[in-house]
Amino acid sequence: MKMSLFARPPHKECERIRLEELADDFLREHRVNGRKSDDDAEARWDIHLKSFFGDLEAGEVSSSLLTKYIEFRQKEGAPSATINREFASLQGIFNLGREHGRVREVPMFPHLKEEAVSEGDLEDGRYRKLVDYSFQPERVDQREQGSTSVATHRA
């Protein structure tokens, strides 16, 4: 029987690899390639994902288990956006495992609807000051003239 150098391990062996092993590979790859999300990915794994998934084998992660994780994290008060980011890390772990031939299948990860984030909410008093400041006549003149020099402002 002829064997390729790039032959994948038997299906059983792929599904028996522990997620902690896959996560180690994923985090190492992040560090080696200097990815900006390195600290976030490591924190997500260490703080939340490892305790729930770390001892499991890749083949044990199913849709129902992912739903149980969602319920678990929601009971802890985690926002949907946080859970989605955790799933993105976990999916990255599986995808890298598949690229390296250590996992054959990547589970389907649910995506939770995220709340619209409104940035810069102001209290009424601060909002009023901002509105008053923005409609001062001298400010309107400056906007109409475009950019002005520092010397003009000091005069």
Image (cartoon, grey):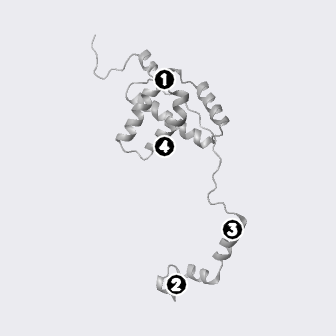
Front position among marks 1 and 4: 4
Which residue is labeled 2 in the image?
A: 153
The residue type indicated by label 3 comes to Tyr
Marks 3 and 1: in contact by CB < 8 Å? no
Which residue is labeled 1 in the image?
A: 58
Which residue is labeled 3 in the image?
A: 127
Quadrant in which residue 10 is drawn: top left
Residue 66 spot, x, y in % from top left: 59, 29
Residue at 64%, 55% (x, y): give it.
118
Please count the marks in the image: 4
The residue type indicated by label 4 comes to Asp
Quadrant in which residue 33 is drawn: top left
In space, the residues marked 2 and 1 are separated at their CA atoms by 65 Å
In space, the residues marked 3 and 4 are separated at their CA atoms by 34 Å
Which residue is labeled 4 in the image?
A: 40
Pointer 4: residues within 10 angstroms few (<14), some, or many (20+)? Answer: few
Residue at 45%, 18% (x, y): give it.
16
Pointer 3: residues within 10 angstroms few (<14), some, or many (20+)? Answer: few
Element under disc 3 = helix
Pointer 1: residues within 10 angstroms few (<14), some, or many (20+)? Answer: many
Residue at 50%, 33% (x, y): give it.
90
The residue type indicated by label 1 comes to Ala
Residue 118 can be seen in this image? yes
N-term-proximal mark, 3 vs 4 = 4
